[in-house]
């Protein structure tokens, strides 16, 4: 058994504790039982487990939890396992220590601790998942908490008469957070269904039926389509002109009288980005370009923007302008067609061939086009038609050009985009608690170990 450290006068900790509390080194608060661990490779475990039933197998633990089963055990009792290497030491929201009980086997990637009687084991476990490990771990690609460094870790010890109530208070608060997370999970499931319904209603006219009643249109959908076609003809030669007369709208949802069905090729200019190649990685005309990693649903992530060489002629062809809508042309089905609007955030930006660009015509708003494309992103039929395999889908340029596009009068487009934005903002506000649950737990523990938890 490893040598256990003993107290030699007062132990200093990272902050002043309330009266009656004290700091101890970890070996004063827990017995270090690393002699109870032994590694065994997977092949040997599998061989040992052959022909054994569930009653003959025991949990096999590693740095962050159970790593399998084995036909024997090294310990029997209540213990805490603390990662030695491979644990997420620098992530304050992830577990570094976890409790085990009964008969088990542990490998050499976790330290084995047994709480001493004077400290509630629940508090010790919480502390091991709260303490900042930066001063105690070393390594570059794989951080390690050596036994020597672990023995120097301070542990706050409250007075014995409040330990049980303090641990129970932490557990009660954690239970409240767990209940809140479960409710938020249900809300997020509801949100998926609700968002599909919202987007469908937006692009079929259902969402703005009351608005149309209060704002009667001045032209029919046929009139609107003729104006779009005239503008489309002005922008393109007759050879490249795509007349949507052949579009079969019989299987499409019925639109309000002032709306018209057309195609993406008519509703705007469609283009695929520039292919990457080693020859483009250097040159006299380096330009920033956007790729799939920069295009989230409804927003751009510009934290990591790459550059490549675009000649002046290429730049003219691939330059992004404010109001362009970018869409993911491939990858997994849930990302297919993921759209966002470029609003000129990066001067001189271009785009890569993993993206498709939709530049709206004068009769189509960018924010409305974003609603249409988000609708298709969440539409099973659209995804199914673009699927290559179970896990792969691809939106080709030709397919995208022919995708049906519902066009309302431009004033109604603005109202649709506004209503979708307002509706989703209200739901986002209600679900903001989801990512902060871990932060709440850490705040509770921080207050508990400063004696501030009431």
Image (tube, rainbow, N blue to C red):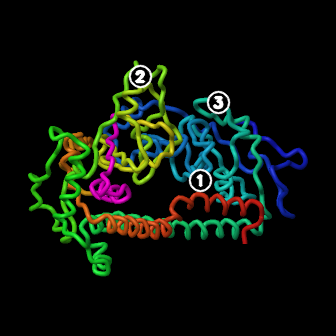
Is the C-beta separation of discs 2 and 1 under 8 Å?
no
Tell me the quarter of the image containing the C terminus: bottom right
Q: Residues within 10 Å of mark 1 (few under 14, many from 20)?
A: some
Circle 2 — which element? helix
Q: Which residue is mark 1?
A: 78
Residue 369 painted magenta: yes
- The dot on residue 139 is 3
Q: Residues within 10 Å of mark 2 (few under 14, many from 20)?
A: some
- Position of residue 322 in the picture relative to residue 385 (left or right): right
Q: Where's residue 165, x and y in %? A: 69, 70
Q: Residue at 74% across / 51% down in the picture?
A: 29
Which corner quadrant of the image does residue 139 belong to? top right
- Residue with the most extreme right position: 9
Observer-side mark, 3 or 2, equals 2
- Which comes before the other along the chain, label 2 or label 1? 1
Observer-side mark, 3 or 1, equals 3
Q: Residue at 52% across / 40% down in the picture?
A: 62
Q: Is residue 1 visible?
A: no
- Highlighted range, magenta: 353-378
Q: Is residue 118 visible?
A: yes
- Label 3, label 1: how far apart the Cα atoms are: 30 Å
Circle 1 — which element? strand
Q: Nearer the viewer, residue 220 or 388?
A: 220
Q: Where's residue 314, x and y in %? A: 37, 28
- The dot on residue 280 is 2
Which corner quadrant of the image does residue 419 belong to? bottom left
Q: Nearer the viewer, residue 106 or 149?
A: 149
Observer-side mark, 2 or 1, equals 2
Q: Is residue 175 above or below residue 5?
A: below
Q: Where's residue 325, x and y in %? A: 36, 48
């Amino acid at each position: 058994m490893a040598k256990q450290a003993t107290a030699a006068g007062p132990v200093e900790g990272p902050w002043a504790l309330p009266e009656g509390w004290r700091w101890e080194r970890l070996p004063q608060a827990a017995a270090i039982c690393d002699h109870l661990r032994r590694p065994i490779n997977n092949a040997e475990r599998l061989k040992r487990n052959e022909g054994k039933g569930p009653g003959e197998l025991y949990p096999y633990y590693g740095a962050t939890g159970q790593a399998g089963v084995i036909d024997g055990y090294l310990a029997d009792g209540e213990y805490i396992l603390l990662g030695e290497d491979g644990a997420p030491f620098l992530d304050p929201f992830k577990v570094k220590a976890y409790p085990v009980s009964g008969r088990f086997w542990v490998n050499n990637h976790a330290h084995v601790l047994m709480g001493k009687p004077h400290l509630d084991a629940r508090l010790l476990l919480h502390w091991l998942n709260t303490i900042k490990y930066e001063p105690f771990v070393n390594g570059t690609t794989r951080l390690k908490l050596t036994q020597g460094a672990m023995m120097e870790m301070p542990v706050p010890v409250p007075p014995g008469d409040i330990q049980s109530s303090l641990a129970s208070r932490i557990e009660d608060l954690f239970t409240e957070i767990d209940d809140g997370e479960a409710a938020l999970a249900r809300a997020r499931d509801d949100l998926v269904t609700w968002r599909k319904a919202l987007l469908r209603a937006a692009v079929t006219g259902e969402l703005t039926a009351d608005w149309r009643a209060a704002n009667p249109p001045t032209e029919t959908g046929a009139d609107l389509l003729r104006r779009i076609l005239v503008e489309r003809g002005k922008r393109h030669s007759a050879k490249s002109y795509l007349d949507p007369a052949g579009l079969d709208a019989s299987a499409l949802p019925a639109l309000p009288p002032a709306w018209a069905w057309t195609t993406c090729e008519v509703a705007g200019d469609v283009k695929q980005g520039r292919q990457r190649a080693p020859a483009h990685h250097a040159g006299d005309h380096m330009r920033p370009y956007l790729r799939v990693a920069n295009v989230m649903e409804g927003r751009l992530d510009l934290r990591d923007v790459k550059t490549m060489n675009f000649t002046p002629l290429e730049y003219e062809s691939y330059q992004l302008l404010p109001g362009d809508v970018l869409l993911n042309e491939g990858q997994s089905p849930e990302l297919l067609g993921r759209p966002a609007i470029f609003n000129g955030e990066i001067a001189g930006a271009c785009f890569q061939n993993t993206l498709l660009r939709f530049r709206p015509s004068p009769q189509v708003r960018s924010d409305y086009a974003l609603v249409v494309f988000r609708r298709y992103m969440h539409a099973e039929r659209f995804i199914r038609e673009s699927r290559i395999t179970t896990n792969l889908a691809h939106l080709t340029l030709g397919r995208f050009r022919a995708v049906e596009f519902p066009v309302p009068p431009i004033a109604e487009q603005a109202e649709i985009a506004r209503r979708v934005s307002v509706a989703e903002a209200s739901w986002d506000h209600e679900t903001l608690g989801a990512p902060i649950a871990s932060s709440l737990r850490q705040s509770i523990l921080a207050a508990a170990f400063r004696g501030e938890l009431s």
